[in-house]
Image (cartoon, rainbow, N blue to C red):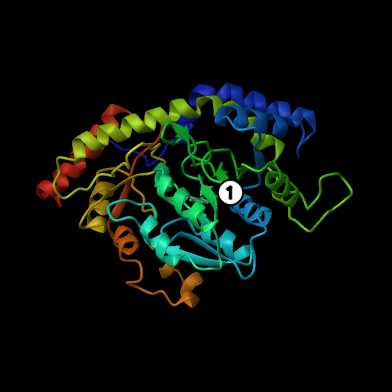
Amino acid sequence: MNVPFMDLARQHAPIRDALHAAACRVIDSCSYIGGEEVKGFEKEMAAWMGVPEVCSAGCATSGLFATLKGFGIGPGDEVITTVHTAIATAEAISMAGAQVVFCDLQPGYFNLDPEQIRKKITSRTRALIPVHLYGQPADLETILSLASQHGLKVIEDCAQAQGARYKGKYVGTFGDAAVFSFFPSKNLGGFGDGGAAVAKDPAVLKKIRMFSNHGRDSKYIHEFEGMNSRLDAMQAALLRVCLPHLDKWNAQRRSAARKYNRTLASISEVKVPRELPDTEPIYHVYCIVVPDREDLRKYLKEKGVATGVHYPYSLNMQPAYAALGQGEGSFPHAEHACKHMLSLPMFPGITDEELDYVCDAIRSYFKGGK
Ligand SMILES: Cc1ncc(COP(=O)(O)O)c(C=O)c1O
């Protein structure tokens, strides 16, 4: 049997006609930037989240950049985030002109450790960016309380966690602001790049919106220099078809994760992902920690099971951050995760047979099949 890492064609099959109709509607409308589809999507996502307003963006990276600018964060400021994330999180901080300050992971988890945040706060810290990595909500209660003690903004990076809940509420509704990604493999994936931002303060959201559209609020007046970070009408129309399915797709991922957990927890060499109390993760990535990742990965490939690694290097080990001088050993928990974590097939519509096949292959590897 071959088990793919993800299968967008399978996920899209039931809504294929609706997607085609939406694409044709946009082509026939001759309105490709902004307009009714973008407004419609923003309204529908806001209703889904239970927030007054959503500002769509060209992608989450630029959405995060615009959000930092919306808070006036820039040169001389420090922003604390996790060292174990997609580079986009850190890039946006540096692009805004601020200094990125990395934190290690909470031992036993894949999200940043609030204790580490506490130690890294200085008089220059302006914001914290917790990333809900792999769809696992970070320890928001502790992070929000640290932020309020020190007068810091919290910007949730929900790129991998759209629809995950913390204490019964969607992530993205806790911080001062939050960003989302519609990169095709994300839980609400589009058909190209796309993203969105929300902010509690309507004045900040207005600034984010203006920043994303060349610093303007009306056609010819540019209040300040911004950039082009707009969601296009085609993406918006296609995302409107997908959004009503998001919670169901996430439930399917959660159910697949439960099955993996039940089966794999009995293999002593395998550590299954742990959930923090009061969280409902949505398993953008389902990853296990094993002693000999590369060897198991090769074995699974031979058995027809596709796997992934998110990520092989923590950001302190990337050439892009060499100037920080935080080489090997600076973030032991993240560096350990990067060497030992393996992402297993996870997508809406993955079958019980496929999940059993993956688990059987892992069991046979540890029984001596290697
Ligand atoms: C945690 C995280 N933040 C931000 C991003 C950036 O998203 P986008 O590709 O929409 O810019 C990603 C994408 O991989 C991500 O995983």
**In this rendering, does residue 296 appear at all?**
yes
Horizontal placement of 287 versus 299: left or right? right
Check disc 1: other Cα within 10 Å, few if <14, some if 14-19, many if 20+.
many
**Ligand 1 within 8 Å of the CB at mark 1:** yes
Please report the residue visible at 53 percent of the width from the left and 45 percent of the height from the top: 175
Where is residue 255 drawn, in percent x and y? 33, 29
The image quarter in which residue 116 lies? bottom left
- Of residues 12 and 134, the one nearer the viewer is 134
Where is residue 247 drawn, in percent x and y? 47, 27
Please report the residue visible at 60 percent of the width from the left and 45 percent of the height from the top: 193
Horizontal placement of 40 versus 1: left or right? right
The image quarter in which residue 226 lies? bottom right
**In this rendering, does residue 349 appear at all?**
no
Where is residue 81 drawn, in percent x and y? 47, 59
Is 224 located above or below residue 192 in the figure? Answer: below
Horizontal placement of 64 versus 271: left or right? right
- Of residues 57 and 197, the one nearer the viewer is 197
User: Mark 1: which amino acid?
Assistant: Ala
- Label 1, secondary structure: give it: helix
Tell me the quarter of the image containing the N terminus. Answer: top left
Q: How many marks?
A: 1
Where is residue 152 drawn, in percent x and y? 54, 56
Is 352 located above or below residue 142 in the figure? Answer: above
Q: Which residue is mark 1?
A: 60
Please report the residue visible at 50 percent of the width from the left and 44 percent of the height from the top: 158
Horizontal placement of 143 versus 358: left or right? right
Query: Given the current orientation, which residue lies at the most extreme left position?
Result: 368
- Of residues 81 and 320, the one nearer the viewer is 81
- Of residues 322 and 26, the one nearer the viewer is 322
Query: Given the current orientation, which residue lies at the most extreme right position?
Result: 220
